[in-house]
Image (tube, rainbow, N blue to C red):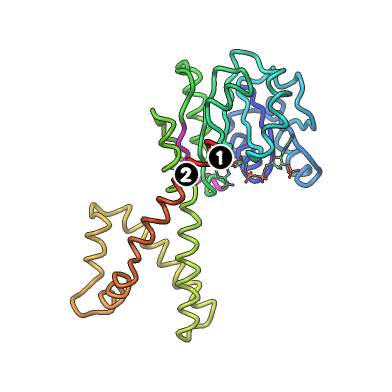
Amino acid sequence: MKITILGCGNMGTAYARSFRKYGLVKAEDLLLIVRGEGRLAQLETLGMISDSVDGRISESDLVTVAVKPQDFGAIAPKLAAVLKPEQVVLSIMAGITLQRLDSSLGHEILVRAMPNAPAQIGMGITAYATGTELSMRQTLMVEQLLNCTGRAMHLEDESLLDPVTALSGSGPAYFFEIVRTMIATGIRLGLEPHVANALVKQTMLGSFHLMEHSDRTPDELIKAVMSKGGTTEAAFKVFADGSFARTLDMGIEAASKRARELSRS
Ligand SMILES: NC(=O)c1ccc[n+]([C@@H]2O[C@H](COP(=O)([O-])OP(=O)(O)OC[C@H]3O[C@@H](n4cnc5c(N)ncnc54)[C@H](OP(=O)(O)O)[C@@H]3O)[C@@H](O)[C@H]2O)c1
C-alpha cells in the first residue's frame, strides 16, 4: 500500500507513526507533505518528505488530508490537479463536508472522518462517512488505517458527524475539565497537589475499567457507590441543584449545533 499524508501536525504525525508502527506501509511508500522545519527530524524516520503538493501524490492508493480546515482552500486546487480517479481521499478536517471536498477536488472516492485527540496514542475513536460507496478493498484499507489509531465506526449518514464531533471529538476536553476541577477542589480542601493529582487520575482510570469489566449500566454503577444519607448522595444533591447533568447535556448540544454551523459556512 502507498499512502500520502498532507499536513503533518499533531494528527498527521500521529497517523504516520501509527501506520508505520502497525506495518501498514513501508517508509519508502509513505509520502509526508510537510510545511516548515518543526518536526522534520522525527518525520524523516517515518517516510519520504516533500514540501509541495505535486505529481508524486498520484502514486498513492490513499491520500490523507490532515491540514487545518482554514488551510484547505489554498491547497485544494493543487491537490485536485494531481489526484487520480481511483485514489481514496481521506479527510480528517473538522467541518469540511463531503460536498465541499467533492466540489473543491472534483474527486469521487471520498471519506470524511472525525477522529479525536487520543488517536495520537492509538486510543482514539473515529467515525467516518463516505461519498460514493467504496469497493471492498478500499473499505478494508480505510478501516485498517483508522483502526491503527484506535477504533473506527462507519456512519451511513454524514450529518451524524455533527453529534459525533460534539461527543467524541470534543469529549476529551470535557473529561479534562472534570479532572481539572476535581484536582483543584482536592487542593482547596487541603490535599497536596501531587496527592490530589494521583487520587483523581487513578480514580478515573479505575472507574473506566470497572465500567468496562462490569455488566452494569452507568446508572447502576452510580447507585452502587451511593448509600442513603452518605457522602456521594450529598454531592449528587448539589449536582442536581446546579443542574450538572442538564448543563453537560446543553453543552454537548451547543457543540453539535456549532459543528453543523461550521460545516455549512
Ligand atoms: N487535534 C485533534 O484532536 C483533532 C480532532 C479531530 C479532527 N482534527 C482535524 O485534524 C486536522 C489537523 O489537526 P491538527 O491538530 O493535527 O492540526 P495541526 O497540528 O495544526 O496540523 C496541521 C498541519 O498542516 C500543515 N499544513 C498546512 N498547510 C499545509 C500545506 N500547504 N502543506 C503542507 N502542510 C501544511 C500545518 O503546517 P503549519 O504548522 O506550518 O501551519 C500543520 O503542521 C484539522 O483539520 C482538524 O480539524 C483534529
Q: Position of residue 124 (x, y in %)?
A: 49, 45
Is residue 58 positioned above or below 224 on the image?
Answer: above
Are the residues flagged by discs 2 and 1 in contact, CB closer than 8 Å? yes
The residue tagged 2 is 165
Where does label 1 land, which residue? 94
Find numbered disc 2 in the image and state the secondary structure of the residue it sits on. helix
The answer to whether 158 is drawn above or below residue 40 in the figure is: above
Quadrant the N terminus occupies: top right
Q: Is mark 1 within 8 Å of ligand 1?
A: yes
**Disc 2 marks which amino acid?**
Thr
The residue that appears at 67% across and 18% down in the rendered structure is: 83
Tell me the CA gap for discs 2 and 1. Answer: 8 Å
Relative to 85, residue 164 above or below: below
Q: Quadrant of the C terminus?
A: top right
Secondary structure that dominates the magenta span: strand
Q: Is residue 19 above or below residue 227?
A: above
- Read off the magenta span: 121-128
From the top left corner, tell me how far across and down residue 226 is, in percent.
24, 71
Q: Quadrant of ligand 1?
A: top right
Snapshot quadrant of residue 223:
bottom left
Answer yes or no: disc 2 within 8 Å of ligand 1. Answer: yes
Front residue of 19 and 236: 236
Furthest residue toward left: 228
